[in-house]
Image (cartoon, grey):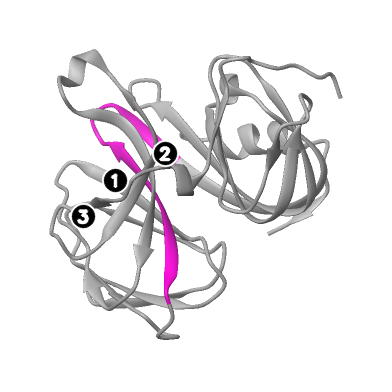
């Protein structure tokens, strides 16, 4: 694999990010990364955050926002989305519009963590692919990759910078080669809604992961 690197790519560790309250005041989250579009005024194009899940609670209502929730801890939670129950374990995801009626139930009654990707419906379309990989992985922003979070295991960059569990690499414009060590990764992809991604997402994932063996 050809190694390439962007010096502006950064590693975000949750312990270094302040907690902020949810919009509805029912919990706390840490903003890991975001990107704004001038056409949206003060609104974001996409935002990635890590939420503390400590008790049963309702999710905030976010009109015009599409959400992808990924359980980022070893345990189980149950999401009720418009009355339909979804039980999630580590690395499992649920997608829903921000207007949905979503309630969290702590199945294990132990604190958990939720990785949340939010995209502005008028500006972007997002996806999260979770893969357990061992070996080199090329992360290319040209395929729409904006970030990758380590859910389990460890990884490192060609520059020898290390990503421990829950660390997130926020990409800039250049590709990055990540060396995974039996690592469960949440790979975050965002594309402009004006371009659309119908029929392109599976191809983008295969290109990004073609040099690494992994299972869902």
Report which residue position mark 1 lands on.
66
Report which residue position mark 2 lands on.
126
Q: Residue at x 18, y 21 (%)?
A: 40
Residue 25 location, x and y as percent?
14, 60
Q: Residue at x 45, y 32 (%)?
A: 190
Q: Residue at x 53, y 19 (%)?
A: 172
Q: Secondary structure at mark 2?
A: strand
Nearer to me, 46 or 8: 8
Res 142 quadrant in image: top right
Residue 109 location, x and y as percent?
40, 85
Residue 188 location, x and y as percent?
52, 40
Residue contact at pointers 2 and 3, CB within 8 angstroms: no
Res 8 quadrant in image: top right
Question: Is 109 left or right of 139, judged from the image as shown?
Answer: left
Question: Is 53 left or right of 12, judged from the image as shown?
Answer: left
Cα separation, mark 2 vs mark 3, equals: 21 Å
Q: Which mark identifies residue 22?
A: 3
- The mark closer to the camera, 1 or 3, is 3
Q: Which circle's residue, 2 or 1, is located before the other in the chain?
A: 1
Q: Secondary structure at mark 3?
A: loop
Span of residues in magenta: 111-126
In the rendered image, the residue lying farthest to the bottom is 108
Label 2: how many Cα within 10 Å (few below 14, some 14–19, many 20+): many
Q: Residue at x 50, y 35 (%)?
A: 189
């Amino acid at each position: 694999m050809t190694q390439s690197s962007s010096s502006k790519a950064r590693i975000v560790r949750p312990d270094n990010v302040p907690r902020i309250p949810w919009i509805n005041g029912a919990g706390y989250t840490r903003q890991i990364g975001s990107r704004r579009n001038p056409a949206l005024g003060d609104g974001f194009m996409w935002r990635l955050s890590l939420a503390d899940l400590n008790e049963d609670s309702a999710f905030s209502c976010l009109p015009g926002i599409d959400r992808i929730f990924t359980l980022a801890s070893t345990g189980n939670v149950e999401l009720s989305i418009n009355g339909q129950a979804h039980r999630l374990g580590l690395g499992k995801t649920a997608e829903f519009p921000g207007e949905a009626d979503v309630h969290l139930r702590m199945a294990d009654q132990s604190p958990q963590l939720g990785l949340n990707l939010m995209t502005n419906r008028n500006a972007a379309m997002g996806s999260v692919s979770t893969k357990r990989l061992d070996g080199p992985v090329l992360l290319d922003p040209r395929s729409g990759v904006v970030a990758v979070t380590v859910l389990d295991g460890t990884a490192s960059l060609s520059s020898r910078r290390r990503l421990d569990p829950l660390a997130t690499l926020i990409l800039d414009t250049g590709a990055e080669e990540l060396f995974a060590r039996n690592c469960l990764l949440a790979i975050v992809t965002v594309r402009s809604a004006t371009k659309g991604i119908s029929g392109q997402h599976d191809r983008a994932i295969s290109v990004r992961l073609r040099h690494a063996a992994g299972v869902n």
